[in-house]
Image (cartoon, rainbow, N blue to C red):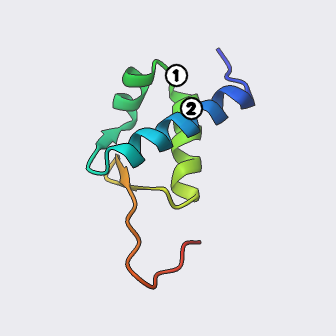
Amino acid sequence: MIATREQIEDLVLRLQSVFLDHPTLALTQPGVERRFGVDDVTCASALGALVDAGVLTEREGVYRRRFPRPGQRVA
């Protein structure tokens, strides 16, 4: 199934909310896929958007909430 733009936007907002509400949460892409019931392409699109926006970081396949250092500019 190919996700629509609206479905990806909805997932982005849902993911952002979860990570902001649970600052210590760390999930892999497969974990997000299971937790939110989405396919790998949709999941990768949403996670990529949140990394690009500076909301999440990704290291070794694990996504976490990004905490900028004081005075650090967000791209």
In the displayed structure, does residue 72 sit left or right of residue 10?
left
Report the label total: 2
- Residue type, mark 1 in image: Asp
Going 49% across and 56% down the picture, which residue do you hit?
Answer: 55
- Residue 63 location (% of width, % of height): 37, 48
Nearest the viewer among 67 and 59 is 67
Badge 2 is on which residue? 11
Would you call the spot at circle 2 few (<14 residues within 10 Å), some (14-19), or many (20 or more)? some
Nearest the viewer among 2 and 46 is 46
In the displayed structure, does residue 17 sit left or right of residue 46?
left
Between circles 2 and 1, the one closer to the viewer is 2
- Residue farthest right in this picture: 5
Residue 52 picture quarter: bottom right
- Residue 10 location (% of width, % of height): 62, 31
Q: Are the residues tagged 2 and 1 within 8 Å (C-beta)?
A: no
Going 49% across and 44% down the picture, which residue do you hit?
Answer: 16
The answer to whether residue 14 is above or below residue 1 is below
* SS at badge 1: loop
- In the rendered structure, find residue 39 and report the number of the disc placed on it: 1
In the displayed structure, does residue 52 sit left or right of residue 72?
right
